[in-house]
Image: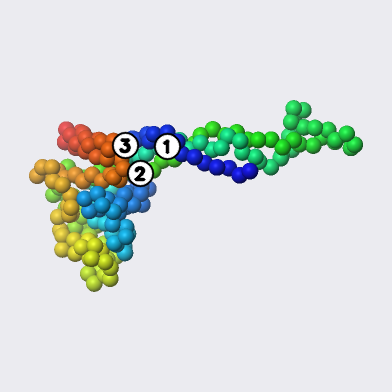
Amino acid sequence: MGSSASVSGPPQLSVRPASVADSASIANVCLLTTFQGRRTDSIVYHSELPAEVRALPYLHLPSGFCFVLVETREVGWDSGVSVPALPVLDSDSSTTDSDSGTATATPYRLRTGPRQTRNIVGYVVGTAESSQFAAEVEASWWPKLRLKYPGDLVGTPVDRYFVDLIHKNTSGIAGIQRVSESTHIHVSVLSKYKKYGCDRLLLDVALRHIRRRKR
């Protein structure tokens, strides 16, 4: 009999600072929430493009910040998993062949405890230094994207929308909500997690972070 896995229990949600290693997961959430929480994975050809404009600059540039919402779930493996017999030397798990007098291993069943899976299901990005961030984007972020996504790039209308932002926008805050003259923030959460108030939680985390940085 093979192993089987099942996911059980309510989600455990937590927030932590993002790392560069989270880039792909952040890009996936962005793709699924780009336009007012609606997914765009079926209407873009260049799947990383939305995040490279709206999310990832804040993770990579000095004056930006990014926090991720992480769902942790317990995954319980079937507690009765048959495994191949191995040579076991203790007397409790071996038998003696009456004809040959040699010990042979007895097949056993392995019981394992639950393990956890962690998935990024939302994020908040922003900056408390909008002017500085815009300068960083123009100096080191847009130039790379303009090479990667030229003005005549072939793609869908949504691709073209983001390509136009890369080539025409110099503020670095396209699609981002301005909180004050020097601050802007953007929250993205997969729709099924909004009922837990996760968008409000991420906003609160971002505002606390900004207040600490301004001290």
Could you give the CA–CA distance between mark 3 and mark 1, rounded to whole angstroms? 15 Å
Name the residue that disc number 1 marks. 73
Helix, strand or loop at mark 3: strand
Mark sitting on residue 50: none
Q: Is residue 130 visible?
A: yes
Quadrant containing the C terminus in the rendered view: top left
- Residue 75 in picture, x, y percent from top left: 48, 38
Toward the left, the furthest residue is 181
Foreground mark, 1 or 2, reads 1
Up-down: is 64 above or below 109? below
Helix, strand or loop at mark 2: strand
The part of the image, by quadrant, that contains residue 81 is top right
The part of the image, by quadrant, that contains residue 50 is bottom left
User: Could you tell me which residue is drawn at 80 percent across and 32 percent down?
Assistant: 95
Other residues around mark 3 within 10 Å, as few (<14) / some (14–19) / many (≥20) = some
Up-down: is 36 above or below 102? below
User: Could you tell me which residue is drawn at 35 percent across and 39 percent down?
Assistant: 70
Task: Report the amino acid beneath label 3.
Answer: Val
Helix, strand or loop at mark 1: strand
Task: Report the amino acid beneath label 1.
Answer: Arg
Toward the top, the furthest residue is 92
Please report whichever mark, 3 or 1, sits nearer to the chain's N-terminal start. Answer: 3
Q: Nearer the viewer, residue 187 or 131?
A: 187
User: Could you tell me which residue is drawn at 33 percent across and 35 percent down?
Assistant: 14
- Residue 139 in picture, x, y percent from top left: 20, 57
Name the residue that disc number 2 marks. 120
Q: Nearer the viewer, residue 164 or 2?
A: 2
- Residue 150 in picture, x, y percent from top left: 25, 69
Along the horizontal axis of the image, is 2 left or right of 141? right
Task: Report the amino acid beneath label 2.
Answer: Ile
